[in-house]
Amino acid sequence: MDWCQVDAESQVPESVDSAKDVLSILSTVSANHKVETLATTLSQLRRWMGSDLAEVEAGLAAIEHRDTPVHDSARHLLSQKGKRLRPLCVALAARVGSGFGATARELAIAVELVHSATLLHDDVIDLGDKRRGVDTARVIYGNAGSIYAGDWLLVDALRRIQRVGIPGLLDKSLSVLHEILEAEALQLANRGNVRGTVADYFRIVEGKTASLFRWALFAGGCAGGVSADHCLLLESYGRNLGVAFQVIDDVLDLAGNPEVVGKSLFADLHEGKMTYPLLLAIERAPTLGEELAAACEQDALCLDPRLEQHLTAVLWEKGVVEECISLARLRSAEAIAALAPLPSSRARSALEQVALALVHREK
């Protein structure tokens, strides 16, 4: 497989037909720019990096397991294989340098364990019943099992990071965990607050999502012996990648196809989370904000069909979906631009393609 160099300037947003659903728009934009879908890109990468990613999967499968609700909860989630984007980022960053070795493998496992830990915690906080199409660990093994499983995976991840012995990396990992917790605290404080700010939204995204992508790229670069300056460039790529990823995720939550996305629409709103597309919609239709504020004042947020229809109409008629996609494409272009000083390589080209494909993902 040959990874072509990508021109970041090709990511200037184009006009889109608001009569289409968001998945159609993403597919059309992807075709116009000859961008592979995320599923296709990941499939190609797995063929190229088969042994690297197989080692990560083997490591995750070998996580210590005992017959307790805690261990069963952790195993339940880890066995539901996701995209493994963060381990992929570690592997590609390592390949920018000397390649994927034992150290990069441990760090790739560690970042997936941290990500899985946050999911186990989130499902309890959000009362999530489904993840990746199956019952969540908390449904099967209870809330306590899910919470402790997340804690256990975090400790396992930190021990792996400590064992590889890269100077300063454990401290950086602890700083990232602090960022995640700070972002979670801000999101919790803003739940149900339709007067939340876009600045707060991006603080949450930078802390909850982008920070772990950032760490994955930095850690992978360190494992591959990449220079300190180039590791910082990889970190910048990861930050922009994470923001683009989350913006598209939030758009799909409001305007995606539930059958493709794999969950019901408005899930974040039902949890009181004020995402970027929602904040834009409220800004452009003040009456919508008033209706949502009234709904959020109820003990259990319940959106009636009329309110859902109003929100959907605003998302399309006021250009919210298009603006969010444009922003994600801009952050994707900024991620690609951050890589420009790196030497040309197959790994760098693959990272560029991942940045493009993430914007065009459908779930």
Image (spheres, rainbow, N blue to C red):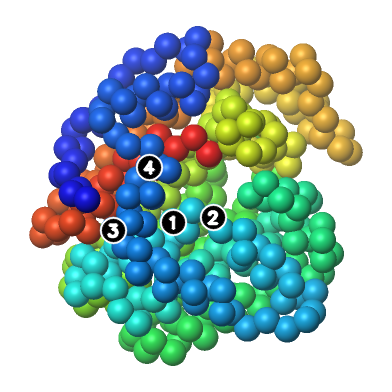
Amino acid beneath label 3: Trp
Say if 166 sits above or below 22 in the image: below
Asked if marks 1 and 2 touch (Cβ < 8 Å), the reply is yes
Residue at x 73% of width, y 42% of height: 271
Choose the circle earlier in sequence order: 3 or 2. 3
4 vs 1, front mark: 4
- Observer-nearest residue: 93 or 47? 47
Task: Give x and y (percent) for residue 27.
Answer: 40, 26
Residue at x 72% of width, y 76% of height: 71
Number of on-image labels:
4
Alpha carbon of mark 3 to alpha carbon of mark 2: how far? 18 Å
- Tell me the SS state at disc 1: helix
The residue where tag 2 is placed is: 82
The residue where tag 1 is placed is: 85
Quarter of the image for residue 282 reads top right
Asked if marks 2 and 4 touch (Cβ < 8 Å), the reply is no
Residue at x 61% of width, y 13% of height: 313
- Tell me the SS state at disc 2: loop
Choose the circle earlier in sequence order: 4 or 3. 4
**Around disc 3, counting alpha carbons within 10 Å, would you say few (fewer than 14), some (14 to 19), or many (20 or more)?**
few
**Around disc 4, counting alpha carbons within 10 Å, would you say few (fewer than 14), some (14 to 19), or many (20 or more)?**
few
Residue 40's disc is: 4
Alpha carbon of mark 4 to alpha carbon of mark 1: how far? 13 Å
Residue 48's disc is: 3
Choose the circle earlier in sequence order: 2 or 4. 4
Amino acid beneath label 1: Leu
Q: Is residue 42 left or right of residue 128?
A: left
Task: Give x and y (percent) for residue 152.
Answer: 66, 78
Q: Is residue 31 left or right of residue 267?
A: left
Q: Is residue 248 left or right of residue 105?
A: right
Say if 236 sits above or below 222 in the image: above
Residue at x 42% of width, y 68% of height: 54
